[in-house]
Amino acid sequence: MPNQNKPTPPLDIITPHILRLWKARRTDKQIVKDLQKHFDTSRYGLGLTKYLEIRNAMGLQRTRQQGHTVDSIRDTMADLCETYPNAGAHEMVNLLFHERGMSVARSVVISYFAIHEPELIRQRKANRLRRRRFWAAGVNDLFAVDQHDKWLKYGLGLHTGIEPFSGRIMWIRVWHLNRNPQLILSYYLDTVETLGHKAFLSFKIIYLLTLSNLPTDMPMVTQSDPGSENFGIANAHTMLRQWYDPALQGTLQHRWMRSKKNVMPEITWSQLRRRFTPGFEALLDHGVLSGWYDTNNTLQLMLFQWVRDRNKVLPHGVPNLIYQSAEDFGALDFKIKVEREALDHVRNIYIKPSHVVFDLVPQPFGDCVQRCYNELGCPLVTRHTVWEVYLRLLGMLQVHDEIPCHIDQLDDIEEDLGTLPLLEDHDELPYREESNGTYYMGGVGGGLGLGIEHLNQLEGLARDDEPEITLSIDENIGLDHAGLVVWEFSDGSDPV
């Protein structure tokens, strides 16, 4: 698009968006096009040539500019392979980009694996696909939630929430347990509240409207495996939907995946166990087998909880862009607006902030560890230093005069799961399933899927030169599936 000799937009306006789109691996032409949405095009102009000057000045270089070879990535690859020993070529290209800022051609990574990791290639080619069929109608059709228990032996409980259509991970949380309904509900409500933090651009000033006066978004339905730990989400989300749509009274706005598989979280956990878990568990096992860490020792367990890094960075990229701008990808967004008043209402009903489950460790113990950590000079905790820092702190605590008796509180947390009753007199939503096993369990059309009005909207997006989408009935699928169909996945779905 010619800029007609208009001045370039202020860098403080476009730089954050350039970085966001760069991390999403958009092409230069796509970035220039997307940037037009974020400045006053009647006053400013930005063409490809000027953008490239700005990008280069920011130190953002494409793959050819960086010119990496097998030799230049060897040390970095060796380090990443310790943490992600089963990552394939596609995954490793993304890890190099997001974690190390390196743009490396996939062919270079494949060559590295062929030279240095030939056994990994053989293992991955031996894997077989397992078929799953699942359909989502659009963005915010549903959130699927699930817990992961494999690390409870280390005192770590994982939980995730996925927006299936975009593939966006709404949260992955690590805590000392993952089956308390108040804790699980807090993950959902915190995420919904965070979606309300939207920055509105006024060409030179970014106005951040707080949650107190800004509505936020929620999905049409939530979904999980059966289990009382999910009663909080089921109740709260149903109440929120009924708050704005009284016609939903008497129908639970949560899906229980009994005979059907909770597919998207399964995919997330499958990828976690294949890509990240082996390296992480090796690190944890090192501490356990060395006799440094015993989950039955309350002092060691609580210190480990304090030391561990709880702030994992969530994935960037196309899933976030699809979620934020569904129409740019020829998709519909079914988000439901919700006010802070409604969120506060359900939070006050179902969550007790003072519940011990929300304490990482009892405060007196945490204060004691923090003082010891300060005395050590606040050393950086990484996967290479975590056990060294842990052992130095453990040695200080074992001879400390002020270790409080409150550490026994942790033993009571698993005992007090804070069970919640499920809403009474509520029917479950209907769902749609075809004879070939394809099924729809979202919230559109009262649980039955897209209607004529939705297909007309999608046709309108297609006419606006959006990416090609399916608008007809696929005989192999059997559903008018103008949405996402997850066909299959396996632990080996990312072959080298």
Image: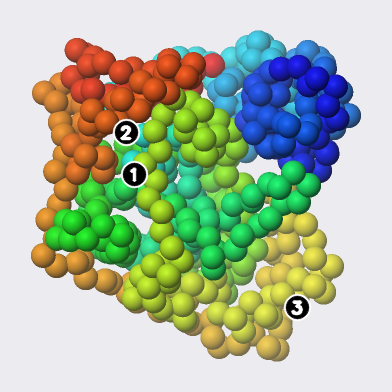
Q: Which residue is mark 3?
A: 371
Residue 134 in the image: x percent, y percent? 28, 30
Q: Which residue is mark 1?
A: 142
| Quarter assignment of residue 430 | top left
Q: Nearer the viewer, mark 1 or mark 3?
A: 1
Distance between the alpha carbons at the discs numbered 3 and 2? 50 Å
Residue 186 in the image: x percent, y percent? 43, 64
Residue 149 in the image: x percent, y percent? 39, 52
Q: From the viewer's perspective, is residue 44 above or below residue 284?
A: above
Between discs 2 and 1, the one toward the N terminus: 2
How many C-alpha atoms fall within 10 Å of the one at disc 3: few (<14), some, or many (≥20)? few
Q: Which residue is mark 2?
A: 136
Distance between the alpha carbons at the discs numbered 1 and 3? 44 Å
Q: Nearer the viewer, mark 3 or mark 2?
A: 2
Q: From the viewer's perspective, is residue 320 above or below residue 496?
A: below
Residue closest to the eye, 403 or 366: 366
Q: From the viewer's perspective, is residue 178 above or below residue 31?
A: below
In the rendered structure, are the residues bearing label 2 and label 1 in contact, judged by CB atoms less than 8 Å apart?
yes
Distance between the alpha carbons at the discs numbered 2 and 1? 8 Å
